[in-house]
Image (cartoon, helix red, strand yellow):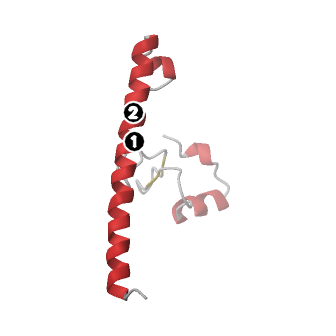
C-alpha cells in the first residue's frame, strides 16, 4: 500500500504530464489550423474572426444622462434611481425633464 507522500508525488507527476500533454496537443492543433489556412489561402477574416474589443476597466464611470438643475446632481440611468429623482417623479415631474 502506498503512503500519502508517495501518492502526492504521483499526483504531482501526473499533473505535470497532463499540463505538458495539453501544451503539446494545443501546439499541434494550432499547427494543423495554420497549415490548412495556408493550403486554402484562408485569412482570419475568412473565418469570421476579428479583434476582440478592448475591455473597459471594471467600475468605469458612465456619463450622466439625467441632471437636476436645482441641485446639480446627476444620474447615469443605471442602477436604482437616486432619491432626488424619486422625489421629483413622485411630485409629478417627468423623467424626460431631467434628460441631458
* Mark 2: secondary structure: helix
Quadrant occupied by the N terminus: bottom left
Any part of residue 55 in sight: no
- Circles 1 and 2: CB atoms closer than 8 Å: yes
Residue 12 rendering spot, x and y as whole percentages: 33, 70
Q: Is residue 1 above or below residue 38?
A: below
- Residue nearest the observer in this picture, 49 or 38: 38
Q: Which residue is mark 1?
A: 26
Q: Position of residue 54 (x, y in %)?
A: 36, 38
Q: Which residue is mark 2?
A: 30
Residue at the (35%, 56%) spot, across then down: 19
Residue that extends furthest to the front in the rendered view of this protein: 1
Check the image and report above or below for 99 versus 9: above
Estimate how packed mark 2 is, as few (under 14), some (14 to 19) or many (20 or more) residues with alpha carbons within 10 Å: few
Residue at image coords 49%, 44% = 65
User: Residue drawn at (39%, 58%), measured in percent from left and top?
Assistant: 18
Q: Depth check: give the residue in front, 81 or 95.
A: 81
Residue 46: give x, y in percent of width and height. Answer: 49, 17
Q: Looking at this rendering, what residue extends furthest in the top direction?
A: 41
Q: Is residue 87 left or right of residue 52?
A: right
Residue 33, position as x, y percentages in the image: 43, 27
The answer to whether residue 17 is above or below residue 41 is below
Q: Nearer the viewer, residue 84 or 81?
A: 81
- Within-10-Å neighbours for mark 1: few <14, some 14–19, many 20+: few
In the depicted view, which residue is nearer to us: 71 or 31? 31
Amino acid at each position: 500500500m502506498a503512503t500519502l507522500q508517495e501518492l502526492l508525488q504521483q499526483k504531482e507527476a501526473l499533473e505535470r504530464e497532463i499540463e505538458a500533454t495539453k501544451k503539446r496537443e494545443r501546439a499541434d492543433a494550432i499547427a494543423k489550423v495554420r497549415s490548412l489556412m495556408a493550403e486554402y489561402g484562408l485569412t482570419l477574416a475568412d473565418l469570421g474572426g476579428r479583434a476582440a474589443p478592448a475591455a473597459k476597466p471594471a467600475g468605469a464611470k458612465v456619463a450622466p444622462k439625467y441632471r437636476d438643475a436645482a441641485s446639480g446632481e446627476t444620474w447615469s440611468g443605471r442602477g436604482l434611481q437616486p432619491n432626488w429623482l424619486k422625489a421629483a417623479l413622485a411630485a409629478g415631474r417627468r423623467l424626460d425633464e431631467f434628460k441631458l
